Each structure stands twice: as structure tokens, then as C-alpha cells.
Image (cartoon, grey):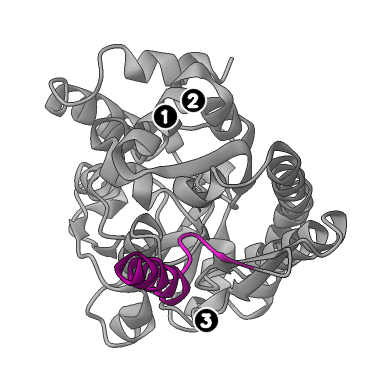
Amino acid sequence: MKKGLLIIALVSLVLVVLPAQGGTEKDGVIEFKIVGNNASTLVTEAAKKMAKEIEEKSNGQLKPILYLEGQLGDNDEDLCTGLSDGNYEMLINPEMLFNWAVPEWMELFNMAFIFDSQDHLQAFWKSDVGAQLAQDLLNKFDVKAYINTIALRGPRYLTANVPVKNVADMAGMKLRTPNNAGVIASWKATGANVTPVAWGELYGALQNGIVSAQENPLANIDQAGMYQVQDYLMQTEHQYTNYFVYMSNGWWSTLNADQQQIIGTAIDNAFTWHNEQVNAEDKKLLAKFIEKGMNFIPKNEIDIQSFKDAIIPVLLEKNKDLYPEGAYEKISQLSK
């Protein structure tokens, strides 16, 4: 009898000592972490709106704890690993988790000029292909990507210390890109000398001549002050990307249907607001860069087709055994 009571006591102690898996619940309030790295001030503001709505609509039953300013790190790889490991419940981040889960699709996804517009990108994630990729991510890492509404980023522009109006102008240019296979392959195909540089080191690399050009959305160019160390801004609009809300599926599965709906609706509302703001912000940033002295080359003065001709056929042939069969055609059809 005493032995049985001892076992019960030990089990009770273990249950008290072990940390709750996927958030904590106290007095009927479910606390959970939403993590970001402040790569975009606009998406950070959207996340704050999302959190506020979740708490209000759940009457305080759901309580997000925000770590949006990089408090838990600013390295995307580490942040994605942390979510997959269950260190927090929600993460706002670009497509890195998909890059790991479905690299054969994402190398094509990251090809320059693969998407024509923000609407084209949204259509991709709302398609059967997007749903399957989300399922593949879930199966591989037990992470749920919310794809009903995504936070669309402004298109990526090219900046350099010389004007670029044709793909021939890229020959030998020391160009910084993110360390992403599809992006690197695209710009190598233009003849550029591609040099991946960490985001935090990019301003110094441009200032010191380690690289002489880079490509990013206008918001990132502004955040890093790159208009101070680059002379020309080209409206190439060569790549469209977005942020997702990712969730630990183990935690998500503990929520009831009403709680899941509250969170999903809050994401929809916050990212819809974000997407209404992002293009207006780009217009303001473009005016700011011109005022600061950057020489702006609009899209109608750039031979965009010369870039497409140098990149798309080359990568389709080079990666014909990597890209899923018919993948390029499926993406192209979504723009029509």
C-alpha cells in the first residue's frame, strides 16, 4: 500500500516538474509565443495586430507572448529549427522551412522572374500545389504553414554602383544575394559574380567594395540604409516573396476548433491589412531614395526579356532532373 502511494506521489511530482509541451495553460489562459526577427517593420506591426485580435476575440483565453524584435535570435535557420523543435508555438518567417522540406520545388520557386506579380504568388499558395507543399512540410517537420493568407512583400529591386539596363550589363558584377540555391543560380546565369554575404554584413560589404551590387525589396533597402552606399536603383521586380505564419502542429492540435478559427481569422485580418499597406509603403520609399540621390531606372527602360532569356531556359535545362515534372508549366498557368 505504501509502495503504491509512493509511485502515485512520484508520478504527480513528474507531472508538476515537466514543462508543458506547446505553450502553457494557467487558470484557463493559454499562453503561447509568437516569434519574429523584425526583418520587416510592417510585418512586425501586422503581427502585433494579430496578437491583439487573438486575445480580444478569445476574451483573454488565448494570450500571445511576443518576441518579434529578434529577442530569440535573428538567424532564420536557427529560428526555423527552434519552431520545429517545439521551443515556441508560432513563427513569422519567409520560405526557409519550405526550402528544407521541398527543395526540388523551392529551387524553381526562387528562380528570378518565375512570378509576374503578387497576385501570381498568392495564387500559387492557394493552388493544389501550395496545399500539397504545406502537407509535405507538415509530414516532414510537424510544422503547419498557414497559407490561406500570406504577407506579401514588395518585389525585389536590383541596386548597383553602375546603371543596369540589359542582362549584358551584369557580366562580372560582384553581386550579393541571399544564400539560396535558386537565387544564386539565377544571377550566375546572368554572368554576375555572385557572392553570398550575411544580411548583417551587407552594408559594410557594399561600403568597402567587397560587393558592388545587391538585390532586395525596397523595405529592406531602406532598413539597411543601402541608398547611402549604392548609386543606382533598377526596377527589375525580378522576384516576389512573402512571409508565412508557421505553427507547431503539436501545439495547434491541442486547440479546439473555436480557438483555431480565432487564430486563423486574426492572421487573415492582419495580413490583409499588411498587404494593403506594403505597396503604398513602396511608393513612399521609392520617392525617398530618389530624394536621397539614387538614380532610378524604371522598368520600361530595362530590357527585362533579356534577363528572362538568360535565366529561365538555362535553369530549366540544367535542373530538368531536379524540378518536378511539369512544375514550371503549372506555375506559369496560374498567372493567366
Left-right relation of 123 to 135: right
Q: Quadrant of residue 212?
A: bottom left
- Tell me the quarter of the image containing the C terminus: top right
- The answer to whether residue 73 is visible is yes
Q: Amino acid at mark 2?
A: Ala
Q: Quadrant of residue 118?
A: top right
Q: Which residues are magenta?
A: 1-25
Nearer the viewer's eye, disc 2 or disc 3? 2
Three-letter amino acid code of the residue under disc 3:
Gly
Q: Are marks 3 and 1 in contact (CB under 8 Å)?
A: no
In the image, is 115 to the left or to the right of 213?
right
* Residue that label 2 marks: 131
Point 46% across, 48% down: residue: 250
- In the image, which disc is placed on residue 135? 1
Measured as percent of width and height from the top left, residue 117 is found at: 58, 35
Dot 2, how many residues are within 10 Å of its Cα: few (below 14), some (14-19), or many (20+)? some
Magenta stretch contains residue 175: no
The answer to the question of whether label 2 and label 1 lie on touching residues, with beta carbons closer than 8 A, is yes
